[in-house]
Structures are given as C-alpha cells and as structure tokens.
Amino acid sequence: MQAGNVAKLNEQLQSDPVLAPGHTYGSIEEKINTIPLPLTKRASKGWVLGFSIAFALLMLLFYSLGVLFARGLGVWGINNPVYWGFAIINFVWWIGIGHAGTLISAILLLMQQNWRNSINRLAEAMTLFAVACAGLMPIVHMGRPWLFYWLVPYPNTMAMWPQFRSPLAWDVFAVSTYATVSLLFWLIGLVPDFAKMRDRATDRTTKILFNILSLGWRNSSRHWHRYEMAYLLLAGLSTPLVLSVHSIISLDFSVSIVPGWHMTLFPPYFVAGAVFAGFAMVLTLVIPIRKFYKLEDFVTMKHIENCCKVMLATGMIVFYGYMMELFFGWYSAHDVEFFLINNRFFGPYAWAFWALMLCNGVAPQLMWFKPLRRNLPLVWILSLVVGVGMWLERFVIVVMSLHRDYLPTSWDAYTPTFWDISLYVGTFGLFFSLMFLFIRFLPMINIFEMQLLRHDQKHQVEGGFGASEEA
Amino acid sequence: MMKKQHKEQPSDVVSQLKRVQIPAIIVGVAGLGVWFLGAGSGTREQFFQTYLFAFLFWVGLPLGGLALLMLQYLTGGKWGFLIRRMLEAAAMTLPLMVLLFIPIITIGMLDLYPWADPAVVAHDTHLQFKYAYLNPGSFVFRAGFYFLIWLVWTFFLVKWGADQDRSGKPAITHRFRNLSGVGIVLYVITMTFAAFDWGMSLEPLWFSAIYGVIFIIGQGLATFAFIILMARLLADRKPFADFVSTKLYHDLGNLLLAFAILWTYMSLSQFLIIWSGNLPPETPWYIRRQAAGWNEVAVAVLVFQFVLPFFLLLNRFVKQKIQLLWKVALLIFIMRFVDLFWIIMPAFDQTVLEVHWTTYVAPIGVGGVWLFVFLEILKRRPILPLRDPIVPFPVSEGTKMQEVPGHG
C-alpha cells in the first residue's frame, strides 16, 4: 500500500522515473553489456562513420601540431598585446566542459541524487577526454613545449623555481591533480563492471583483458564494502576540485590588473560557467547516444530535464556575472573600466559580445518551461548554442580585454589564423575519437548502479519520505 | 484563521517557545533602552553606526529564511520539510525590518553615508559621477523596491503554505516550485544591490563585484546556524520530536559546513584578487581592516567561523548529535556578528579598533525584539506542514516517525 502511495505521488507530481519500469537485473546488464560485447564484433555503420570523421579531425590536430612545432608560435594570430589567443580560450573552454563530469560524479553522489547514476560514467569519461584536450593547450602555447617540466618545482642545477605567486604555476598543480583524481574516480567506478564484462566475455582475449582490469573483483561483500568506502572518499576529494580548478584558472586572469580581468567575482563566476558548459556538453552527447543505442529506459526524460535545470541555474549565475561586470564597469568610475564596457558594446569585437548575450543570456531562458525542456531537438540545439556561447565568453574575456588596455599606442587587433582554427577543430577529433572508442569498448552506463536503482524501485523507497540510502 | 490553527497546536512546542519568548523581549527592550541611553555619551554618528550594524545583522535572518525557503522548495530536499515553518516565520518578520529600516533612511542617512552629504559630493568628482546611483532619492526608492519584492514573495509562499495545510493538493507543490524559481532569481538580484547600497556604499569609492555574494552566503550561513539552534530548542518537544532524526541533523550539519566553506571561498576570492592587483581604489578597504586590533578580529573570524567548525563538522559524530551540533552552530552564529562587525564598522573612519561600547548592545537589543516577534509568529502556526505531498500521510499529533513508509 505504501508502495502504491509513492507511485501515485510521483504521478501526481508528474515526475519521471530515473529508470523506466519493467526492467530486471538481468535485462539491465544485458542491455548495457551487449553494446561493447563481444569486443571482436563488427562495429555498426553509424559508429564507423562517426569514428572516421573524428579520426580525420584527430589527424588534423596532429598536422596542426606538426606545423606549430616546426615553424613556431608565429603561425598563430597572437601578437603584442594579444599574447593569449585561441590556445588559452580553448584551454579554459575544454577544462570547463570537464567540470560537469566531476560535479555529477562527486557532488551529486554526496547529495544523494540518484538520477546521476545513469549518466555519471559517460560524464566522467567526458571529463577525462576534455582535460586531455585542455592540458594540450598551455603546453603547446609555451613555445618550447619540451621544457614544460620546468613548471614543476624540483631542485635543479639552474637554481630556478617557478613563481609561486603566479596562478599559472598553480595551474600545473590544479590541472594535474584534477586529471589524476578524475582518472582514478572513473577507473574505480569501472572495476565492478569490468568484472561483469569478464564474466560475460565469450572469447579468451576479452576474458584476460577484463580479468586484469577488474583487479580480481569477486563480488564479495568485503570487496563491495571497500569499494563503497573508496568511492565515497574519492567523491569527497573531488568535490573541492570542482571549485578549485576553475577558480585557479579564473585567477590566471583576475590577479592581473587588466581591465575586464580584474574582478573579484571571477572565481565563482568561472566555476558556474564551467558547470554550465559541461552540462551543455553532457546533453550534446547524451541525446544522440540514447537515441542511437536505444537507452531511453536508462537515460530518461528526468535526466534530460534535470540537466536542463542545472544549465538554467548555472546559466543564470553566469549571466549575473555579466551584469556585475557591466555594473562595475560603470560604478568603479574608472575611465579604463568604463572604456572597456563601451568597447564591448560598440568596439570591433562587439559582435562577439552580443552573440554571447544571445547564447548565454537569452537562449537558456527557454529552459524555464517544462514543455521546452522535454523537447529533445530543441534541447540539443540549445546545448550547442550554450557551447558556442561559453567559447565566445572566453573570447570576449581574453581578446577584448587584451587588445585595448591602458596604453592606446600598443593597441592592436587580433585575427586567428588557419592554424589557430585547425588546432581548435583538431581537439574535437581527439575528444570524439576517445569518446567513440569508449562507447565501443566499455560499458558507458554504470551497470550495478542501475541495478541498485532497480532494487530501490522494486522496494519503492525512491521519492518516499525516508531517503533511499537507508534501504 | 490563525486562531483556529492555534487550537490544533500541541502545547508542548508552544510552551517551549514561550519559555524563550519572555526572556527575549526582556533582553530586547532592556538592550534597546541601554543602547538608547548609552548613545547619549557618544556622538550622533556613533548612534546610527551601531544601529546600522545591528540592523544589517538581523535583516539577514528574515532574508536568509526567505531564500532558504525557496531553495528547499526548488531542490525538494527532505531537510526542508522539517524546518519550513521556521524559515517561513523568519521571513514573516520582514515587516518588522521595514519598520526598523525607517530610521536609517529618514534621520540617519546623512550620518552614515558620505555620498548623501552634498558638501562631500561637491568636492569629489568620482562621487559626482556615481551620483546617478548613489543619491538619497534613488537609495530610498531602491530599498522600497527590494522590500516590496521580498514581502510579496513571502506573502505568497506563506499563504500557499496555509492552503496546502488545508487541502494538500499536489498542484500547490508545482506552484511553489515556479514561484520559488523566479523568486530566488529576484532575491539574488535585489539582495546583491541591497548589499551594495547598505554596506558597500559606506565607503563609496571602494567596490568589489563579489560583495553581494558574500552577503548572500553570510545570510545563508547565519540562518542555518539559527535553525540548528531552533532545532535544538525543540528537539524533544512534540510533535517536532516525532519527526526529527539523526538524518535531519546530519543534513543540516552538512549544509552548515557547505555554507561555511562557500563563505570562505568567496571571501578568499575577494582578498586574493584585491591583494594581488594592489590598486589604490581597492586596497584601502583591507588596509583599514588590518589596522591595530582589526587584524586580530579578521583572524578570529577565519579561525572560529571556518577552520574550527570545518574540522568539527567533518565528523559524522558531531553532525548527527544535536547536543554537539548546536554548539558549533552557536559558535558560527556568534562569529557571523563578528564578521559583519569587521565588514561594517571599519568603514567609519577607524584607524584602530576603537568602537563605542553601545556597538555591542545594539544588536542584542534589536535581536531580542526580533526573536520575540519570530517566536510569536512561529507559535501561532503548526510547527510542521500538515499536508505536504512529500509526506504521504497527514501529519498530526500522534504520528510517529516509525510509521513513515520507507523510514527504518
């Protein structure tokens, strides 16, 4: 009777389930496992086509890097005063995208949001691949990338240390920690599912491969206990990273006194922007994938709607940041700050500013309305719009602030070259190649967590007054 | 209508609330009296400065209550169900705050805000530039607008809460969510500018874009601390006692921890960026607040509002025991005073930490009166929502937690 009550309540509140009804433990495992297994099967035509495009772009990335290394940074459009061009824009953009994965896997876990369960692994994979794309950028921007290890503080015969007061040195720690913890989180979460893959595998090679990856997992209660503990600890460790990484990146800008960079709101505003872009990317990926692999039962409308809501909330915070920038451009009563605002409105790059307002300020407002949140084509297009908007935001911040600062004699315009653009497009090749390989060879949805949801559903604790974690 | 519900109210909670209410009003009236008489030994400026400090602290609880009320409707967290009436009661004290605000905008403005003085503005080109925003007329107009928004939202949230108690219609839950979604956006905007107007413009040449956010997070922190103290007060009183569990305390403890971390994060952001930029328009704010005595206050705020509570609240043991949790909450609540003291008071030409003794009495007086009104409102309504669909049964006196489905 109590179970009926909860179901009725959900119906009354018109909320979708996080797992469509009618699944058994077996059907869940079957459905998710048969996407990668058997590993030796022929990939579908759609996958081959998608991977081919991504791989071609990856080749473009390598070619662009080759040209860059052979001919130097001069192939890019950066100049004096715009020292930071596409490379930094792309760095901030990619690493921001990664943040949704960490938020979903760590913060939503700690907040006991069970809707995270079907999208967390995909989002974590997205984080890893995005960090890979991001990490590339500052390294190739160095001019002599083979000396990148000079950024690491180690005793050396030159008696040379990084400038510890510079956030650029903090970046090295922030990003490398972030990459390490994200990788660990993702791998540990995969262990029980690797074991399931091992048990399901029919051929010897697959069996051996997953046997190694599953680290001797035997489903014993002790294993589960330790797994839960490790996962929770990693979630605790990752949570500050969601804030710290992008905060430090925002400090790269805001500790300087460049107008448009030096603003005390930058850290939280950058973090919100990162989560905003990240959730947009999750939607960009998840909507086609769930359709293509018929995963609508696992990634339900509830997931889509919740992602939209997070996007709306973080989008509003980002918009708040824009409004504060404009307000303080005026309120500071500082002529350079005031000029910057003027330059944003009417300067040579005003188009980028207005496009940004449209993409990140106006477009997300559609997410206020439930019917629009449930309109998949619209949501997908909107997720792309937000992705573009967040890129424009970094363009506005980096280029618009640098190209005209205090000294009018050193003003100069910035125009990206072909190699700027090809490198950026090439990182999509890296990102999507890895993504396609991940989808093809690993379970993209966490099998046992879905089975746990099924358990909760069966015993009807979801949505009830006592929380499901007690079940 | 309120009278009728009063009858359904079990006496246990009410008697407990009454026990606090009487001392509250005595302390309040006595505090205000002492402050009023004591102010005679100080200057007119000091009189209003201490008053503004007291007002800015206590206005944080109704506003924090309103914001958290909307937040719990939006996130649907189960912690919200048990503390909802307290948040509502806090928000419903807003009319009192309007009343308390009137002295500031009528007789006190000239003594508090340099930009309100035409003689000062005449000699400062920056203030002339800012005059479009910083002038008495628009200051009052904006304050009216902020209060209007807050009052309208409080009115509907409370009214629909009463509707839900009567009918229990799930459609009301939807209305709550929609209203709260819009409301939280408006709250953040209005509170940001209220913080700029009431606090930041005390030093009208200084600016920091994160100032409003620091205020908002501070209000949330103070409100959570206050709610935990209230939960301690009612922990073993029926019907509240039948519903609270270690789970609630754990959730509240976590939220308190989260807000303490956020407060530190925002404050550190502001400090680091201003320190690093080292620009003449920005650094004076911190220089004033690092002068003799003030620096020690800053360190105390950092240690007792963040470092110590952080390590205490990491422990499940502390969070799940209200007997321990309330002590941490009390520490944070007191440190909220100190923090605001450090933010506001150095604005008034302080070279060393030297404030009039009435500074410490004014917030106690205002607080006593506020607490009395808050408890009066809380007392008149059922302490828990009666028919929220989140709880699939009507709440009444006899219901025990053990009977709640899914709760083991």
Image (cartoon, coloured by chain):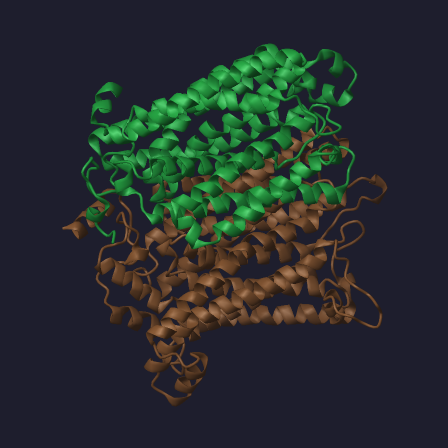
Using residue A124 as the reference point, say whether residue A80 is left or right of it: right
Chain B color in figure: green
Q: Residue at x 78, y 66 (%)?
A: A72
Q: Position of residue A137 (x, y in %)?
A: 66, 62
Q: Position of residue A285 (x, y in %)?
A: 45, 60
Quadrant of the drawing holding the N terminus of chain B: top left
Above or below, B12 against A61 in this view is above
Quadrant of the drawing holding the C terminus of chain B: bottom left
Of all residues, the one furthest to the bottom in this rendering is A204
| Residue B368 shows in this picture | yes
| Residue A439 shows in this picture | no
Using residue A9 as the reference point, say whether residue B236 is left or right of it: right
Using residue B126 as the reference point, say whether residue A35 is left or right of it: left
Task: Identify the chain drawn in brown.
Answer: A
Q: Residue at x 49, y 46 (%)?
A: B258
Q: Position of residue B283 (x, y in %)?
A: 75, 36
Q: Nearer the viewer, residue B283 or B172?
A: B283
Q: Position of residue A408 (x, y in %)?
A: 83, 39
Above or below, B107 against B70 in this view is above
Of all residues, the one furthest to the left in this rendering is A1
Using residue B56 as the reference point, say whether residue B271 is left or right of it: right
Give the tally of numbered discs.
0
